Image (cartoon, rainbow, N blue to C red):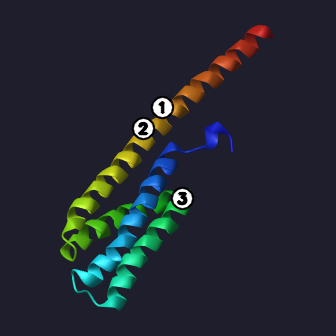
Amino acid sequence: MSERGRSPRRGMCAAVLSLEAITLGLTTPVMITIADVDVATALAVGLGLMLACLLVAGMLRGEWAYGLGWAIQVAAVGLGFVVPMMFVLGGIFALLWGTAYLLGRKIERERAAAYAALDAQIAAEGEDDA
């Protein structure tokens, strides 16, 4: 894939989701041992959210997948009702996700404008040579 085709937003958001997957996976034993959550429920929630992070990280080519990423952030913060520390950790990851998303969009816009200016300059130089 060319440099023009790479999405900084996708890369940064995928990195956040990948790291968040580890955190959410590690909440599973915490839910079982400290929060006294039923084992099946803890496995479904903790490992389910972990798997969702990894799947969505791989699907970020579609704009709709970013909506799923936002939903995961809400779920991670909501997990704080079961494991109070997740209010903090979920909030940190939501902040990282939002920053990666917004900064990535800004970089994509600026990059598109820079490539458009470069293309216009190359086209103008081509006309001057003719």
- Residue 40 location (% of width, % of height): 36, 90
Q: Nearer the viewer, residue 52 or 86?
A: 86
Q: Residue at x 21, y 70 (%)?
A: 80
* Local secondary structure at mark 3: loop
Disc 2 crowd rating (10 Å Cα; few below 14, some 14-19, many 20+) is: some
- Residue 112 location (% of width, % of height): 54, 34
Q: Residue at x 69, y 45 (%)?
A: 1
User: Which residue is denoted by mark 1 in the rendering?
Assistant: 110
Residue type at mark 3 is Gly
In the image, is residue 103 above or below residue 23?
A: above
Disc 3 crowd rating (10 Å Cα; few below 14, some 14-19, many 20+) is: few
Query: Which of marks 2 and 3 precedes in the sequence?
Result: 3
Q: CA distance from mark 3 to mark 2?
A: 18 Å
Query: Which of marks 3 and 1 precedes in the sequence?
Result: 3
Q: Are marks 1 and 2 in contact (CB under 8 Å)?
A: yes
Q: Are marks 3 and 2 in contact (CB under 8 Å)?
A: no
Q: Are marks 1 and 3 in contact (CB under 8 Å)?
A: no
**For residue 47, which quarter of the picture?**
bottom left
Q: Is residue 24 visible?
A: yes
In the rendered picture of this protein, how many numbered marks are placed on residues?
A: 3
Q: Residue at x 33, y 79 (%)?
A: 29
- The quarter of the picture where the C terminus appears is top right
User: Which residue is denoted by mark 3 in the rendering?
Assistant: 62
* Local secondary structure at mark 1: helix
Q: Nearer the viewer, residue 129 or 20?
A: 20
Left or right of 61: which side holds 9? Answer: left
User: Which residue is denoted by mark 2 in the rendering?
Assistant: 106
Q: Residue furthest front?
A: 33
Q: Residue furthest right?
A: 130
- Residue 104 location (% of width, % of height): 44, 43
Residue type at mark 1 is Glu
Q: Is residue 59 visible?
A: no
